[in-house]
Each structure stands twice: as C-alpha cells, then as structure tokens.
Image (cartoon, rainbow, N blue to C red):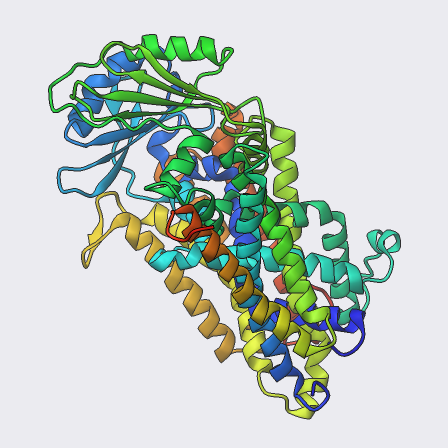
Amino acid sequence: MKGDFRQSMAWLHTWTGLVLGVVLFAVFWTGTLVVFEHEIDRWMMPDTRGVNPAGIGHLDGAMPVINELAGESPSWFLRMPTEREPAALLSYQGSDGKRRQRHLDLAGGRVLPDQGTKAATDFLFPLHYKLNLDWLNLGVWLVGLVGMAAVVMAVSGIVIHRGLFKELFTFRAHKRLPRASLDLHTVASVIGLPFHILMPLSGVIVMAFIFFPQAVDLVYADADNPSAEFREEARGGLAREPAGEPGGLGSVDAMLARARTLWGGTGPAYLSLRHPGDANAYLKMFRAYPDQVALGRGRLFFDASSGELLERFSAGPVMTVQRFLVGMHLIRFDHWPLRWLYFIGGAMGCVMVGTGFIYWLASRRKRHRQQGVPGMRLVEGLAVGAVTGIIVATLVFFVVNRLLPLETSLAGQSRAELEVWSFFLAWIAAFAHAWLRPDHAWREQCWAIAGLAVGAVALNAATTGDHLIRTIAEGYWPVAGMDLMLLATAGIAARTATVLGRRSTTSVASAGEAEVVAG
Amino acid sequence: MSREMSPVFEGGQRALLAVVGGYWLTAAVVALSARALASALERSEAVALAAMLGPIVYVVALLWAFAEPRLQRCWWVLGGGPLLAYGVVEILSLMAQGQVGS
C-alpha cells in the first residue's frame, strides 16, 4: 500500500490489532479457559462434585427418572458421564416448550439439584465461538472474521519481524517499556506460532459449512433441502417420522453394550432418543473420543423398542480430515500433557495480544500526546477493558456464582442469567473505569483481579467446605487446580500492580514492566 | 490516485474490499471448486474439501488487498470479481435445477 510490502504488512498488522484487538483477546482468553471447562464446571456446580461417573450399565435403571423429566418432550439428549464430567446432563423440551437441562447421577438413579448456572460449558464456551451474540448468527460470523484476522496477523507479523531464531531468545525485561513489551510480544508469538496459526484456522473449519453454504447449495441444487441432504451424506442421519402409535423402549444397556462392541470397547458420549413413546422411536448414539483426535467416525441408530441396529455411519476420507481438524480444535481426547500444552499455548496467545496493545500504547504515547492525536485515550481505554477488564469480569462471574443462593431470581432473570449479567456489567464497568481514570486504570484493575481471585478461593471454601487443604489431601484435582490457578492469578496480578505502582502513578507508558497475563 | 488519498481513507476501502469482497469471491470460488470436484469425488466429499480450502483462499485475499500497491486493481478483483464469479454460480445453479437449458 505504501509501495513497500513490509510497510503495508506493518500497517495491516497494527490496524487489525487496534480494530479487532478487544474481540481477539476475548476469544483467546475464553478459549484458554475452556481447555479446562469441565474443571471450572466442578468448581461452579458443587453438587456435581464427587458423583460416581459410572453410566454404562445404569441406563435402564435411570429411565424412570429420565421419563419423568422428559417424557413429554419430542426428543431428549443425554450427555454420558465421564471422569471429568461425572454427572450426566439431560437436555429436553419442558412442558412450556422451553429448553431445559438437568444434571443426573445415573448410578444413583437421581436428579441433582438445579445448579442454576451456565458455568463454563454453557457460558464461557459459547462466549468463545459466538460472543453470546445470537441475533442473525452475528456472533459466529464475527468470531470467524476474527479467526481469519488472527491468521492475517500471524502472516503479517512474520513478514515484519527481523530474525526468527534470535527472537526466540530475546526478552530484555529490564529495558524501557516499548522495548520490553515488544520483546515479550515477539517471544510469545514466535514460540507459539504453530498454535496461533492452527487454532484460528481449525476453529474456522469447525464452522466451514456455516460460512460456505453456497457450495452446498450449488452442489445439491437439485435437492429439496440441500443442507439437510448434505448433512445426511456427510455426517450420517436417519430421519424417521413418528408413527402415531405407542411403542415401548427396549433395554438401553443392551444397545449400549452392542455399541461398545462395534466401537472396539469405547462407549458413547451422547445418546438421543427421538419420538419417545412412539412406535417409530429411535435411539441415536454418538461415539466418545477419549482415544483419538478426529471427532465423528461413529454414529449408530437403534430402533427404540426392539434394539435393532438401523444404521451405522462412517465418514468418507475428506470428511474424516475435517473431523480431525475439528477434533484438533475441540480436544475431546483424554491426554493431560497435551491438554496442558494447549492451555500454555492459549495463555501465550493472551500474552501476545495483551503485549501487542501495550507495545502500541508505549511506543506511541509520547509522540501522540505531543502531536495531540485524538483517539489515544480511546485506545488506552479499549486496551485496559480488553485485557484486565475481561479478566475482572470473569472473576466477578466466579464470585457471584458462589454468592448467589440457588433458586435466586430477580426481575424475571433466573440465577444463571443473573450471573451472566454480572459478567457483562463488570466488563462495561471496567471500560468505564479505564476511560475515567486512564493514569491509574491498569494498576487498579490488577489489584481488583488479585482481590477477586483470592475472594473466589475463600468463597469456595466458605460455601462448599472443599477448601484447598482438603482438596489437595484428597487429591480432588478439579477444584484444587481451579483454586491454585486463582491464587496464581492473584499473585501475578498483585506483583504487576506493585511494579506499576512503584515506577510511577502514570499509565503504562512510564512503567518499566509489561503486564504478564496468564490464565 | 493513491498518493493523494489519506491513508485511512485508502485503508478503509481496502478493508471493505478485503472483508466483504474477499468473502464473496472466496465463497463463489469454493462453490465452483466444489462443483468441479463433484465430478471426481462423492458430492459431500467435494463440498467438504472445497469448504476446508476456503479459509486459506480468504486469508490470501485479505493479505493481497493490502499488499497490492494499485488500489484500482483491488477494486477490479475484489469488487468486480465476486460479481462475475457469482454470475457463474447462479447460472450453474439454475441449470442444475433444470430451469435453463445448457
């Protein structure tokens, strides 16, 4: 654009970061958190802790409970229990027509008390891929654009950097902020480069058929319902209409045993019963993937009353590649070292975006202030809200989860909705705080993070009795890990706030140390 | 023309062409590639392959919109290109539905 390839890439890198940085950080942050979504869920839903995760062999015994909840629903969907998610989750349509979800203890044959929270799987995870924006599917498209922008940032960043090998080992923390933050930005970007490129790309590929429906419409132009027919050919499907006559349900445990044999010993992750109580009812089973990356090599359809296997679907080679890329992004496999590597990659991504903001501010502040360039204060506020702001909002979400009694509601909003309100109100407040107190915002929000994180740990101990000493002694790592992570966050935030306070009372530009953001 | 334009105004045009024009061009290319591949692969496989390559095509379009020195060229390729490509998609689609003779 300025006649020089490198210059145009530098311009592109800077402006994309400024325009999309807030959303970029939000997607990286939520993505990093939901690597451990099940552990966060245990922390936020205490009644699901310590449930016996046995599911197979207990389905027939649990059917009366399931029928009582979902018997009137046109279909129900059951997430089977696992080590990390020991309570089963039943989704169904209530008598009022609204979608409902309840946690079940299958082995014990009982319904768990309504936890009244969306927790990580139902709030932080959707926030990651659609920013809670359902209107016209805008959220999914915006995140898709941000994903593509992330790849563009990586490529333009590679073009404008100076020396890949040297940069891996350069972090001059003692230098002034512009130099130090750029070094940290480069290190975080270069070390995690394959991750920072593959995650956005695979994320977009998860939604590939939503983003490119034109291909489906053209290739299936002669079909009545192109997208339905494509889905059936690509992912397998059976659409059997209800017969209108009553029918029973055979032994689900027997069907499960059959499925396990067909799947070489692995059980299902999900079950779905369509048209319960009807003669044409059928049970769909979706394989679990503890042992492989690709998601979607096994779907089974059983006739509900006879248990007869109606259809067994296996994806073609190209679709298997797509399912592999999806699996690479959603990481449903059981592999702790890999899972931790993903978490570290995500955390580095957060550091990358955060230091990108800090570098821009630190390197432009003096010059722009002298020249009186407008918008500087806007960007400073955006940066604080984007980075420390969303962290504050997340911690408020955790704290409110521990504070609100079950069955709370206010102004027509359920307890789960109130938690979500607290997240967004806190985030907005963080932006407002940043614009009102630009010289102190970074430091004060760091202190807020430290206080809230410690508060969350204390509240967990107070409200559930599962304090850190007990959870570590018993080896209950989901909750222990969450508490330890919260304390680590508090430590890092407090240290950052102290350093920022020591240097000067003015903003990031005068401080000597970049803020390190870790999950 | 580019030399007198403010960088933000020019950048804004390129951004619009990249994001919107680039998307429509990519989507049309994906659709046409899927159609072409469907003669060699099963339909669902052809669509899947084309759709997976789409994001890479889009990233290339996004980068090119800012790397190409001549703004006018961007307008032709990312403004006119989608119109042309979509025209072809529409004709093929109507043919497949049996409404236009080949």
B7 relative to A380 in the view: left or right: right
Residue located at (53% from left, 44% from top): B35
Q: Quadrant of residue A205?
A: top right
Q: Residue furthest front?
A: B101
Q: Is residue A406 visible?
A: yes
Measured from the top left, where is residue B61 in percent x and y? Answer: 64, 62
In the rendered view, tell whether residue A317 sits above or below residue A206: above
Q: Quadrant of residue A494?
A: bottom right
Q: Quadrant of residue A259?
A: top left
Q: Is residue A486 visible?
A: no
Measured from the top left, where is residue A40 in percent x and y? Answer: 46, 40
Residue located at (32% from left, 41% from top): A224
A194 relative to A128 in the view: left or right: right
Nearer-the-camera pick, A308 or A130 = A308
Residue located at (47% from left, 28% from top): A84
In the rendered view, tell whether residue A483 sits above or below residue A13: above
Nearer-the-camera pick, A406 or B47 = B47
Residue located at (42% from left, 48% from top): A126
Nearer-the-camera pick, A86 or A205 = A205
Measured from the top left, where is residue A375 in percent x and y? Answer: 57, 83
State the quadrant of the N terminus of chain A: bottom right
